Amino acid sequence: MKAMGTLIAVVVVVAVVVAAVMFLRRGAGSAVAATGSDPLLAQIEMKYPNGPVRRGSLGDDHPGAIKEILIFDADDHWFFVFLGLRAVGQPFELSLRTAKNAGESGPPDWPVEPATRVGDAVRDGMECARGATWKLGAFSDEMPKSAGFLTLLDREFGEATPDKLLQLVPVTQDEVSLTGDEKWALLGRLYKEKSRMIGEKL
């Protein structure tokens, strides 16, 4: 049974990676405007009327919870929106922001895999709310000091109604291990530090 569980886990991870690669191969030429029929997306569209610079569907056959990913140009950073959790009964979707780097021709690839892992964990019953911690290890060479995410209300759409965005903010090994008052103090500092909220390299 243990071997079977390991095999299933490997298959799911491979499926996620393949889907992510297929999505990331889509360039800015595939950009389309967010639909106004969805209240949350309509609010995002009002803020970013040019629509996403990249939009990709992972498809109904994709085993993960996240089915669609939108990436917006937010001037000094890239704004990722991961859609699919409302379809499984959650009152929110996930977001992630990464600072732009000199010489960058487009949004980075690395956010897709860890964010979809969080989405799958939420679908499978893990609680996700303001203050939730996700210990995932380092994401990539682009975020060498990262050890996971801390969940905050999105800096722009965390109070959106009827559904909102919860933002995944990369944190260090020391930060991801904080609990109690120390963790809540960190949340307060992160909200005040724009550089952290827009995902500057740790």
Image (cartoon, grey):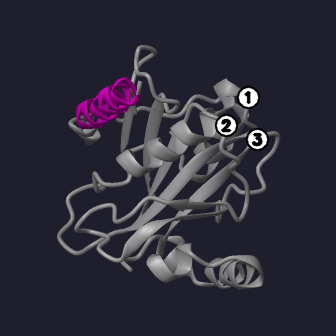
Badge 3 crowding class, 10 Å Cα cut-off, few under 14, some 14 to 19, many 20 or more, is: some
**Secondary structure beneath disc 1?**
loop
Q: Where is residue 131 in the image (x, y as percent from the top left)?
A: 70, 65
Q: What residue type is labelled 2?
A: Gly
| Res. 37 visible in picture | no
Horizontal side of residue 20 vs 80, given as left or right: left
Q: Where is residue 187 in the image (x, y as percent from the top left)?
A: 68, 77
- Magenta-colored stretch includes residue 104: no
Name the residue beneath numbered marker 3: 163
Q: Earlier in the sequence, mark 2 or mark 3?
A: 2
On screen, 92 above or below 105? above
State which region is magenta.
Answer: 2-23
Q: Which mark is residue 125?
A: 2
Quadrant in which the C terminus appears: bottom left
Q: Which amino acid does label 3 sit on?
A: Asp
| Res. 163 visible in picture | yes
**Secondary structure beneath disc 2?**
loop
Disc tally is: 3
